[in-house]
Image (cartoon, helix red, strand yellow):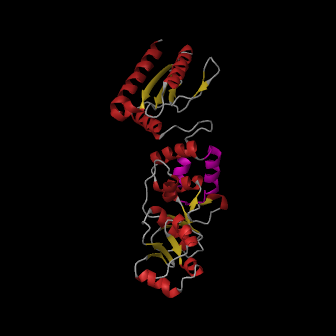
Amino acid sequence: MATISSELAVVVSRRHGIVTHDQLLEDGIPRHSVRRLVTSGLLVVEHKHVYRLATAPDTFESRCAAACAADPGALVGGVAAARLWRFRHVWRPDVPHVLVAHDRTPITKGVVLRRSNVLSTGEVVRRDDGIAVAAPPRAWFDCARDLDDERFERLTEWVLDQHASLPTLWSTAQRLQARGRPGLARVKRVMSQRADWQKPADSGLELRVLKALEARGVVLVRQHPLALPNGITIHPDGADPTIRWALEIDHVTWHGGRLDAQRDKTRDRQARLLGWEVERVTDQELADDFNGTIDQIVALYRRRQSTFAAA
């Protein structure tokens, strides 16, 4: 039985067990031997002239590599690219979502096919494992068609924190704003709600809290700039400047040690010198009893409203 060379074996191993018909022929394996390897089950047909070694597991990455090997012009995008980039707040597909140009005749099975004529070289990241994946800003934009507004808003904050600047996302949205493009309306809604000076939220938890408060009639300004007497400007997670009240969500599950706690206390004292009241709630409290904690925050906010009005 014909076997591949050690050189090709290294390449195939790096590419999740995926090998093409041409690679096998170039490696010196005759056509009839390739057919015999398929018939015997040692090669699994993934696409026309694209195979997976039977000893290699069938994984999401191997499916992506197989799709890219079957159509060199294909690009893994949308929620599939989000999975490869390990985006948060996005569901994990099992089937690759593949972007191709309108004038191509791409693979027709084993993928979710999406067409686009707006694909620049700067949007393509070619990995060492043979997968061509959309760069984070393009993957972010294409995720808009598959998420609701709340999840896309959380994703936007996460991408801003981890992968891209606000101008980059705006530039991506403007370049892709063809009429009728799926997800464009959601991108515009979410992006138009951000002020240009806003920093990305540390996690989706802040957004979830602010949305829950808004549903109870407490509308806070996210990351309102507050200049402290010591010259530092802070941006509370939520604030109502009309009553000088702010809310901070502390992530004690991954930070919040002695130095962080001391810094927060110092800033809270500085805010009080300006007549502000800062309430703090931890992610652990929210995890233990989200609705109950939100009710307490609302009660504290209403009390501040009453006190401030009476002053």
Q: Is residue 139 left or right of residue 52?
A: right
Residue at image coords 54%, 18%: 266
The answer to whether residue 244 of the structure is visible from this angle is: no
Q: Measuring 42% from the left and 17% from the top, which residue is drawn there?
A: 306
Give the quadrant of residue 284: top left
Magenta stretch, overall SS: helix
Front residue (pair 258, 11):
11
Question: x, y (%) of residue 26?
Answer: 60, 80
Placement of 207 over or under 135, stated as above or below: above
| In-front residue for pair 143/284 | 284
**Where in the figure is residue 49, as x and y percent of width and height?**
51, 79
Q: Where is residue 310 in the image (x, y as percent from the top left)?
A: 45, 13
- Residue 302 lies, with reference to residue 191, above or below; the image says above
Q: Which residue lies furthest to the top in this view?
A: 311
Query: Is residue 25 shown above or below 200?
Result: below
Q: Does the magenta stretch include residue 85?
A: no
Q: Is residue 59 visible?
A: yes
7 above or below 151?
below
* Residue 181 percent coordinates (x, y): 55, 60
The one nearer the camera, 58 or 304, is 58
Residue 176 colored in magenta in the image:
yes
Q: Which quadrant of the figure has residue 68?
A: bottom right
Q: Magenta segment range?
A: 164-189
Q: Which residue is drawn at 51% across and 66% down?
A: 13
Left or right, 195 with reference to 82: right
Q: Which of 27 and 179 is in front in this view?
A: 27
Total residue callouts? 0
Q: Residue at (48%, 65%) from the top-left corner?
A: 62
